[in-house]
């Protein structure tokens, strides 16, 4: 029988919400892999995994695909992961036994780690590591019968602290606009993928933008310390963090970053606060088996040891943003938007049936699912679903280095009318036969004003800045 201080029976509802929320995000992540991995990273993808694993040793990128990769094997991993996540979302293993529950979380973490560690540029996002770290801690969440471990609840709060405090520090050390409270004069317009409400948030009065920044600084630099104080202070801190994350959910498309942060922050909310919302959840008072308690203690010691480098990074002057110090993505450092772009540039891809294009050639635009293109199209809502290609397209105007390994292969796929690749796009302007030439042009985008919206119906106004990449055709150089 473990001592009382190792148990947190008054966090059973919190445990349930963490587990079900995490399972839902895992499910989305595996569906994204099923639908997008093959054209981006498959055998014939833009960054083929077989080429990657041939050059990178197992210890640098642990993955079952180090032994064998095929598109069929990836599909199996994706569907198995999605099926396990669905059962965890429904609470089936949690209702059966503790070993089955732990096995389910272990499988989800290992399968998704195998995908992330070979995902290269297309999986180089902070929320991948955040999902894996959250999922690793879930191995010791327990099933529905036993009392939650107080240590695991504390570890989730420590994770929430690092997510928020790291993001706050990177902002204060980075762009001047965070310090003079002007960053949100630009950010709603220049963020990677605006959503249907982003236009309206951008058009808020500047005084409200200043309050937005102040609220953000409070949520990231002050409130996280409340997570480690007694109740009800910890619950107030967690609630404030959740509300600020929901604000981000309605103002932009950040894949599952906000939702996984919300899941982690729930660890600060006791059952007394959540009981009116979920009165049907029964209390879990049974003591866990000794081996489980020993495992939770071991997990705590492991996280404490691996926290040395993230803490050193937080305190250091050259803070890294969204970095994993180990290939298992167990304890990581986080941060977001240390700098904010003042203008929005978009790479627009076009094709023509002319092999030797002239000024008179007819060029047709490819429309992406999420990123801005047609000025008349309202920005869509996709989060928590992650459009990986669209996100990488946002980085291209910032530096050509972001696309030097894959962008030409992407254009080659368009010239071949690659069916799998085209499914990642919203429209294919050449459904009958592929274009003979494609090019990429750089446009400066801005939101329309209220009067422009009323007059034209357009969400964006754009101005041509020049060629990002001149017209290219499928020739011997591409074949090489």
Image: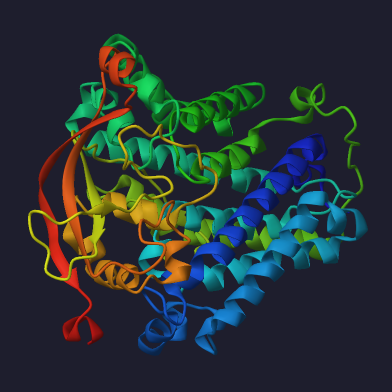
Q: Position of residue 479 (x, y in %)?
A: 24, 85
Residue 217 location, quadrant: top left
Residue at horizontal 35 percent and vertical 14 percent from the top: 211
* Tally of marks: 0
Given residues 293 and 453, the one toward you in this image is: 453
Residue 362 as seen in the image, left or right of residue 130: left
Relative to 108, does residue 375 appear above or below in the rendering?
above
Q: Position of residue 198 (x, y in %)?
A: 39, 27
Relative to 458, does residue 167 appear above or below in the rendering?
below
Q: Position of residue 16 (x, y in %)?
A: 77, 43
The image quadrant where one finds the N terminus is bottom right
For the question of whether residue 268 can be seen, the reply is yes
Given residues 16 and 284, the one toward you in this image is: 16
Residue 104 location, quadrant: bottom right
Given residues 451 and 308, the one toward you in this image is: 451
Q: Position of residue 256 (x, y in %)?
A: 53, 46
For the question of whether residue 328 can be seen, the reply is no
Residue at horizontal 38 percent and vertical 42 percent from the top: 166
Residue 107 as seen in the image, left or right of residue 348: right
Residue at horizontal 40 percent and vertical 54 percent from the top: 310
The image quadrant where one finds the C terminus is bottom left
Identify the coloring: rainbow
Relative to 165, does residue 53 appear above or below in the rendering?
below
Residue at horizontal 81 percent and vertical 43 percent from the top: 4
Given residues 466 and 328, the one toward you in this image is: 466
């Amino acid at each position: 029988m473990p001592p009382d201080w190792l148990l947190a029976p008054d966090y059973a509802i919190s445990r349930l919400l963490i587990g079900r929320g995490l399972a839902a995000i895992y499910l989305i992540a595996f569906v994204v892999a099923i639908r997008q991995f093959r054209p981006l990273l498959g055998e014939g993808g833009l960054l083929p995994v077989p080429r990657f694993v041939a050059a990178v040793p197992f210890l640098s990128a642990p993955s079952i695909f180090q032994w064998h990769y095929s598109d069929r094997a990836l599909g199996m991993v994706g569907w198995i992961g999605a099926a396990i996540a669905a059962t965890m979302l429904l609470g089936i293993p949690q209702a059966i036994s503790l070993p089955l529950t732990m096995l389910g979380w272990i499988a989800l973490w290992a399968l998704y780690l195998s995908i992330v560690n070979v995902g290269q540029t297309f999986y180089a996002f902070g929320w991948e590591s955040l999902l894996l770290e959250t999922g690793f801690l879930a191995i010791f969440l327990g099933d529905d019968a036993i009392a939650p471990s107080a240590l695991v609840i504390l570890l989730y709060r420590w994770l929430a602290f690092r997510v928020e405090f790291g993001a706050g520090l990177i902002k204060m050390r980075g762009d001047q606009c965070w310090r003079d409270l002007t960053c949100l004069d630009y950010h709603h317009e220049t963020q990677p993928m605006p959503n249907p409400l982003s236009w309206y948030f951008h058009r808020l009065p500047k005084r409200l933008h200043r309050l937005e920044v102040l609220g953000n600084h409070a949520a990231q630099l002050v409130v996280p310390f409340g997570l480690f104080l007694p109740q009800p202070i910890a619950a107030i801190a967690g609630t404030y963090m959740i509300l600020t994350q929901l604000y981000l959910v309605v103002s932009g498309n950040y894949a599952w970053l906000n939702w996984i942060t919300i899941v982690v922050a729930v660890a600060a909310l006791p059952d007394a606060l959540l009981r009116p919302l979920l009165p049907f959840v029964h209390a879990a008072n049974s003591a866990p088996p000794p081996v489980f308690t020993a495992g939770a203690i071991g997990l705590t010691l492991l996280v404490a040891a691996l926290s040395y480098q993230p803490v050193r990074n937080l305190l250091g002057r050259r803070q890294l943003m969204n970095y994993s110090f180990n290939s298992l993505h167990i304890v990581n450092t986080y941060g977001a938007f240390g700098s904010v772009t003042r203008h929005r540039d978009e790479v627009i891809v076009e094709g023509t049936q002319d092999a030797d294009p002239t000024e008179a050639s007819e060029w047709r635009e490819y429309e992406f699912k999420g990123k801005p293109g047609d000025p008349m199209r309202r920005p869509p809502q996709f989060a928590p679903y992650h459009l990986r290609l669209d996100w990488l397209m946002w980085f291209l105007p910032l530096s050509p280095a972001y696309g030097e390994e894959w962008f030409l292969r992407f254009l080659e796929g368009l010239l071949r009318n690659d069916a799998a690749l085209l499914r990642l796009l919203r429209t294919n302007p050449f459904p009958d036969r592929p274009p003979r030439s494609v090019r990429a042009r750089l446009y400066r985008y801005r939101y329309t004003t209220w009067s422009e919206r009323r007059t034209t119906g357009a969400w964006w106004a754009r101005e041509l800045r020049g060629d990002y990449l001149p017209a290219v055709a499928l020739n011997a150089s591409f074949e090489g």
